[in-house]
Image: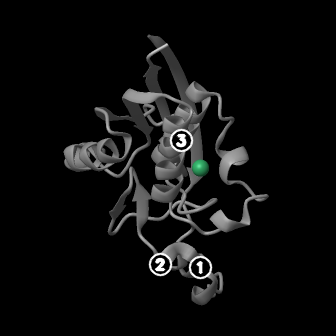
Amino acid sequence: MTWRVGQGFDAHRFVTQPADAAAQGVAADVASQPARRPLSLALLEWPGEPALEGHSDGDVAAHALVDALAGAAGLGDIGQLFGADRPEYAGARSRVFLEETVRQVHQAGFAVLNASVQVIGNHPRVATRRWEAERGIGQILGAPVSLSATTTDAMGFTGRGEGLAALAVCLIGRAQ
Ligand SMILES: [Zn+2]
C-alpha cells in the first residue's frame, strides 16, 4: 500500500457590502457588486453572511481541500487545474472543482482515505453546521471528512474580520 499526504491553504477577503459603502458616503453600484450572493463555505451557502471575493465562489475550505488532494496525488495545485488558462472552469462553483479533483485523484489510482479541514475566522459559526458540511464534502470524497474552526484571538486579517482562511490536510492511498 502506498500512502500520500497533501496539504492546502487558502484565504479570501470578504466582499465589501453595499450597505457599508453607503454608510461611508461612497456611491455603491449595487449591480456591479457580487455582495448580494451569500457566503459559500465548505460547499454550503450561509445566508446573512458576507460573501468572499475571489476566483469561483471564494470557498476557502473547498479550495484548500482541492490543493491538499491535488498535492497528495501529484496533480499540481488549484491554479494549474482550474486557473485562467482553463476557461471552461471560469465561474464554476467550488463543488465542480472538488468533484473534478477527486475524479483525477481516482484516475491516478488513489482512493481518498480521509481529510481534515480547518476554517480560520471570526464568523460564521461553523460548528452550527459542521455535520452538514462534513457529510456533503464526504460524499464527494468517498471518505470521512472532519471540519473544524478556530479564531486567531483578534489578531491578523481573520481576527479583524477582513476575510477567512482555511487549512486542509488529506491522506490518499493506492494498492502498490
Ligand atoms: Zn481560493
Q: Secondary structure at mark 1?
A: loop
From this viewpoint, which residue is outermost toward the right?
Answer: 85
Alpha carbon separation for disc pair 1 and 3: 27 Å
Looking at this view, is 83 or 60 the one in front?
A: 83
Q: Amino acid at mark 3?
A: Val
Where is residue 64? Give x, y as percent: 53, 39
- Residue that label 3 marks: 66
Looking at this view, is 20 or 104 the one in front?
A: 104
Q: Earlier in the sequence, mark 3 or mark 2?
A: 2
- Residue that label 2 marks: 36
Task: From the viewer's perspective, tell me whether residue 137 is left or right of residue 29.
Answer: left
Alpha carbon separation for disc pair 3 and 2: 26 Å
Taking the spot 46% from the left edge, 44% from the top edge, the residue there is: 61
Above or below: residue 134 compared with residue 59: above
Task: From the viewer's perspective, tell me whether residue 65 is left or right of residue 115.
Answer: right
Where is residue 168? Give x, y as percent: 47, 32
- Residue that label 1 marks: 33
Looking at this view, is 41 or 93 the one in front?
A: 93
Q: Secondary structure at mark 3?
A: helix
Q: Residues within 10 Å of mark 1 (few under 14, many from 20)?
A: few
